[in-house]
Image (cartoon, rainbow, N blue to C red):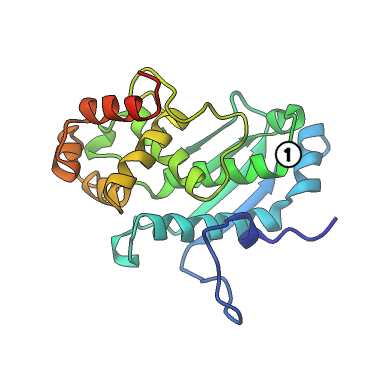
Amino acid sequence: MAAFDPVQAVPFFRVPPGKAIPKNAVQYKASNQATGTPGGNRFDLVVGCDSATEIMEVASDFIWKTFQQEQKERKTVSQVTLTVESLDGIAYTANNKIHLNSDYIANYVGDVRFEIIGIIFHEITHVWQWNGYHHNARQGLIEGIADYIRLKAGLAPPSWIKKGSGNWWDEGYAVTAYFLDYCNDLRHGFVASLNCLMKDSYSDDFFIELLGKPVDELWKDYKIKYGSL
C-alpha cells in the first residue's frame, strides 16, 4: 500500500510545488490505546499515528483558511491530541483532545481511511471554531459547521443524507452543513463571518445581519430550491 499523503485527502487544499506544509506553533500528537484490538489494528493499517498527526495539521490549516483567520484571530491552543480507544459513539472532542472510537473503526463498512480522515476534520473543527458566549450557540449549528468543513474538504461520505433533507435548519451535522453551504453561496465567506461573530456571543439575528433574512425564511428558501418543502 502506498504511503498516505494527507494533502491529497483535501482537494481544496494544495501546497505550491517546492513548499512544505505550513508549520505553526501548535503541537499535534496521536496515540493508539487500542493496539491489539480489531479497531486499533485497523487504524494502524489504514492511517497510523504519524499520518494522523499530519492530517490534524493539514485539517487545521484548511479550517483557518475556510474561516479566513489570520493567526491573531485564532484560538490560542498549544497542543491538540488524538486518542484512539474504545468508547461510546463515534468520536468526541473536549479540551482540545479528540477521542476516536476504535470499535467504530473495527465495524465500519466502506472506505474506513476516508471515514477516519473525515472524522478528524470534523472533530478538529470543534477545537478551532467559536461557539458563542459560554457556549450559548445552538448545538446543531456547532455540529453543522464541523460537517460543513468536512463537506468543503471533499470528505463527505456516501452515507450522508441528500442535500435539501431535514426538518429544521439547526438539526445538525449534514443537514445543517448543506444549509450552511447554501447560505455561503448567497454570500461568499458567510460561514467565516458567522464564525467570527460567534466569538463573543450568538444570536439567530446574525443571519439577518449577514444575509438580510431571518434564518427560518432562509431555510424555507433552501427547502424550496431543493424541492423538499
| Vertical relation: 215 (above or below) 29 | above
Q: Amino acid at mark 1?
A: Asp
Nearer to me, 96 or 132: 132
Q: Is residue 6 visible?
A: yes
| Vertical relation: 117 (above or below) 53 | above
- Location of the N terminus by quadrant is bottom right
In the rendering, at what x and y percent does residue 135 appear? 28, 35
| Vertical relation: 188 (above or below) 7 | above
Q: Is residue 35 visible?
A: no
In the rendering, at what x and y percent does residue 21 appear? 56, 71
In the rendering, at what x and y percent does residue 25 appear? 46, 68
Image quarter of residue 55: bottom right
Q: Give the residue number, with chain letter if any, for mark 1.
A: 111
In the rendering, at what x and y percent does residue 78 appear? 44, 59
Circle 1 — which element? loop
Nearer to me, 185 or 34: 185
Q: Residue at x 38, y 41 (%)?
A: 181
Taking 106 as reference, is 96 left or right? left
| Vertical relation: 48 (above or below) 177 | below
Q: Residue at x 41, y 21 (%)?
A: 166
Q: Residues within 10 Å of mark 1 (few under 14, many from 20)?
A: few
Q: Residue at x 55, y 60 (%)?
A: 58
Nearer to me, 214 or 88: 214
Q: Residue at x 51, y 71 (%)?
A: 23
Taking 7 as reference, is 77 left or right? left
Taking 6 as reference, is 183 left or right? left
In the rendered picture of this protein, how many numbered marks are placed on residues? Answer: 1
Taking 192 as reference, is 216 left or right? left
- Location of the C terminus by quadrant is top left
